[in-house]
Amino acid sequence: MAQAPEAELEMLQGFKEQLEGERDAITQEIEGLESRIEELTRMIEEGVPPSSAPYFGPMPFWGPAPYGPAPQPEQERLMLEQQAEALEQQIEAIKKRLEELRRGG
């Protein structure tokens, strides 16, 4: 069963917000890397000995981007209800097919 257009719209808007949050975090990481690359390139070109290079500590953790903002309670409720309905339909389809197979079909 398809979702109601309003519910799907809300779900997609929430997903878009999450992806935009991830994009912002990735953009910040890229900007930090670009800055460090430029700094290291200048140091190499200027022949700065490694001992005089400033220490910046360990590199940042390279993992998945943080999640975007949490959905509003009503939006989350709608998404969970839709997900539960979809799962129930899948379970019913599985049960129906199992019964067909038991009968030899």
Image (cartoon, helix red, strand yellow):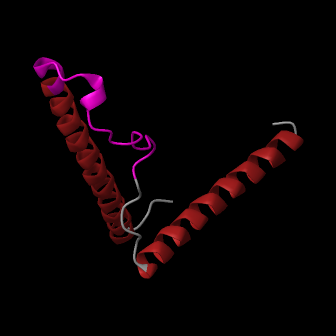
63 vs 99, nearest the viewer: 63
Q: Is residue 51 magenta?
A: yes
Looking at the image, residue 105 sits to the left or right of residue 75; the answer is right
Vertical arrangement, residue 76 with respect to residue 103, above or below: below
Residue at 81% in and 46% down: 98
Region in magenta: 43-65
Residue at 43% in and 63% down: 3
Residue 85 position by quadrant = bottom right
Residue 32 position by quadrant = top left
77 vs 85, nearest the viewer: 77
Residue at 17% in and 26% down: 43
Q: Quadrant of the C terminus?
A: top right
Residue 64 place in picture, x, y as percent: 44, 45
Residue 75 place in picture, x, y as percent: 41, 75
Residue 20 place in picture, x, y as percent: 27, 55
Residue 78 place in picture, x, y as percent: 47, 74
The overriding secondary structure of the stretch rendered in magenta is loop
Count of numbered circles in the view? 0
61 vs 69, nearest the viewer: 61
Residue at 25% in and 53% down: 24
Q: Is residue 69 magenta?
A: no
Residue 12 position by quadrant = bottom left
Looking at the image, residue 101 sits to the left or right of residue 24; the answer is right
